[in-house]
Amino acid sequence: MSRSIDYGNLMHRAMRGLIQNVLTDIAENGLPGQHHFFITFDTLHPDVELADWLSDRYPGEMTIVLQHWFDNLTVTDEGFAVTLNFGDKPEPLYIPYDAIKTFVDPSVEFGLRFETQGDDDEEDEAPMEEMAEEADPPPQQDAEVVSLDKFRK
């Protein structure tokens, strides 16, 4: 029986650990400087928790913004909970890390994208239109997706 190293799964686990570390720091110390996050996630993931009206409005995926106002940010090993304002209506959300599709901090041109077997090139151009009403969406070209090829010699 041959065995191989599943680099894709290992990389996803490391990237989710990075998100957990960043969110833990934000929960403890607040957002530094101009940092803010656009987090796109799968609303159909079985462990996602959000109001029915939000899941009806965003069937499939949704992008939230952690910037000007958020409350009750709680970070665990499996995911994070946060209360966000949607049109002056605070709503609690729970997002497991494995439901996250993209994590972007446009203030430093940093971004992570989680590839799945069903992803194709067209998804790279999908607009990030489902935003909590906290900030304008970042231009797609402002984010840098981390790729292993960038670090190879």
Image: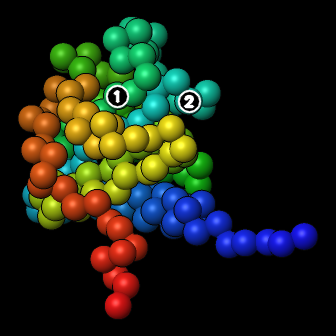
Pick whichever, 20 or 3, lies toward us: 3
Percent position of residue 143, x then y: 19, 56
> Percent from the top left, x then y, of residue 6?
65, 66
Tell me if residue 65 can be seen: no
From the image, tell me which residue sits under label 1: 62
Q: Secondary structure at mark 1?
A: strand
Of the 4 image quadrants, the one containing the C terminus is: bottom left
The picture quadrant where one finds residue 129 is top left
Quick one: which residue is furthest to the bottom in this view?
153
User: Which residue is label 2 attached to?
Assistant: 45
Q: Amino acid at mark 2?
A: His
Position in image of residue 56 (x %, y %): 41, 9
**Residue shown at 72%/72% (left/top)?**
4
**Residue 119 shows in this picture:** yes
Task: State the image quarter where residue 125 is shown.
Answer: top left
Viewer-proximal residue, 25 or 46? Answer: 46
**Label 2, residues with CA under 10 Å away: few <14, some 14-19, many ≥20:** some
N-term mark: 1 or 2: 2
Residue at 30% x, 77% y is: 150
- Amino acid under label 1? Met
Question: In the rendered view, would you say 63 is above or below 96?
Answer: above
Q: Secondary structure at mark 2?
A: loop
Question: How busy is the neighbourhood of tag 1: few (under 14 within 10 Å), some, or many (20 plus)?
Answer: many
- The answer to whether 58 appears left or right of 137 in the picture is right
